[in-house]
Amino acid sequence: MAAIAHPASCLSCALLWQLLVQHHLCCAALRVGDSPHDGEPDYAEQLRAAAAGNATRVAVTGPLQKIGEAIDDFLIPRLEWRFSHCSGSRRKSKCVLLRVSDTALRHFRVLDSLQFPADTEDPNRCPATIKTSSGWVGQATEEDFYFSFERWVSDVKDSKKRTAFLPVWSDPRMDSHPAEYFSPFCGELDVSSMTASTVSPMTRQECFFLPTSSCTMDTAHWGKNLVDETDMAVPFRHRLSKPFDHISSGDLHVMWQMLFFRQNARTRDEIARREAEWRSENQAWPASGAGPTCAAIHVRHGDKLTPFWIKAHDTIAGGFNKSFDDYLDVALKMMKEKPQLTDASRSKERPLVFVMSDDADIIAKAKGSRRAVVHTVSPGTPLPSLSDTLADGKNDFGYAAANSGDMLSWLLSIRLMSACSLFVGNTESSFSRFLYYGMCEQRNGICPRLFSFGRRLDESPTIFEE
């Protein structure tokens, strides 16, 4: 993909729209279904015009496939903008995009300038800090990649480098690929048969998500002496003005999630289809952004409670041996402490709770609870039972069998959980952090209230509040 420059001045027909933007500073809306020309409208260009000025919200209307592609083109070099939701039919759909808060905006524009440098003609020769990982989704996104991203931000702040950060979710040093998150959703991408000589470096990540940078890695460099963190950078010539100052680790986590997990049009379409089907069977669940009427729970058991990891990571002291009722007790207490976290119209009904776990025993217990109305999403592959696994003397929880069906169920679950304003989990688990910060990303950087059973203390984001 070629380097993408920020758009030039808008077409003359958009000047009137810019005046309207100045009148409505906080919201811009544009109908893209009509055009004075016989040809297909340039939906992406019209989106750019609608987002000019100080707009923080853009609504566009048109054929879903066409505007979905235009939204991708618009979003790719503009990390400060987020997809929110679409409504209507496929023939005439209205989609809403949101911009981050003014406080966060300057940090994202620094990120834009680094990730999508306008002066790079050859994307294979961009100055980039490259990190590869083939780890599990939580490990790769909240440990392998995130910690490298954090170091990269620190180097940029200290004027040590001015590069793009390029995460590559494949590892050329691996002869096999233990996680098949990308099959079969990615069609011809048969991960199980790939080798370092045949895999394209960027295909796995960009099957589900938008590119993180206009810089890319060509096949010629793939598999050649890459270490844990390869810096293919050239000395920078321009000093940035106080980049990434006054941001917390919580801010960085949310910023990272917003960079890495921006769903492309195909993934958004699939998640929307699954969400509509799920909501038709779970009509009591609140709409995203409808208000704080529910609680989200993630119970991490799995291999954390096998003899090896109990000893290796002291997981009992880390709080991983809590029951579903322990989690539910906390969630209900938090909802009671904050009356605004419950819907007054449902005050005499059982509270709404969404539950995720890697342990079938937890899901069974949750579904049998009479203390709350429990909602779940079916996993792509069946969950193992902790009690059965321990009884059989096994340690394998089938994480290697996870496929694209699991990835899609996780993304759908995050989407549904983001309707809630509190999250109960254990952030010593990288997957719990993936879910929590995924909720923040879906809520445009505004994180739900967090309770963690673990020893890890996570800082709250500060730059996304207005």
Image (spheres, grey):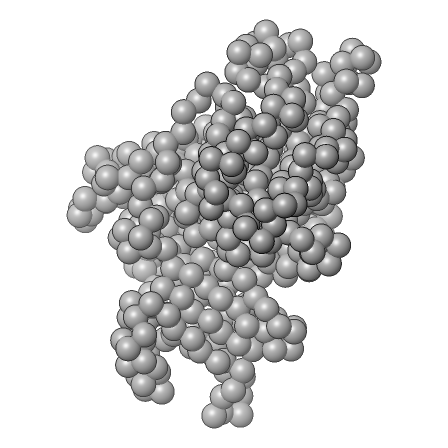
Residue 227's quadrant in the figure? top left
Estimate the x, y position of residue 325 in percent, counting from the top left: 65, 25
* Residue 100 visible in this rendered orientation of the protein: yes
Residue 264 picture quarter: bottom right
Residue 129 image point, x, y percent = 38, 39
Q: Residue at x 42, y 75 (%)?
A: 29
Say if 381 sits above or below 35 in the image.
above
Q: Residue furthest front?
A: 348
Q: From where the camera sits, is residue 77 visible?
A: no
Q: Looking at the image, which is closer to me, 59 or 165? A: 59
Work out whether residue 256 or residue 163 is closer to the camera in this orientation and state it.
256
Residue 140 is situated, as x and y percent measured from the top left of the image, at 53, 33
Report whether 287 appears left or right of 247.
right
Q: Which of the pair 401/234 is nearer the observer? A: 401
Residue at 75% x, 54% y is: 281
Image-quadrant location for residue 356:
top right
Q: Left of 328 or right of it: where is 122?
A: left
| The one of 107 and 197 positioned closer to us in this rendering | 107
Vertical relation: 351 (above or below) 43: above
Q: Could you tell me which residue is drawn at 37 percent across and 50 percent down?
A: 115
- Above-or-below relation of 390 to 465: above
Q: Position of residue 249 (x, y in %)?
A: 35, 34
Which residue shows up at 57% across the image and 34% down it?
Answer: 332
Give the total number of marks visible in the rendering.
0
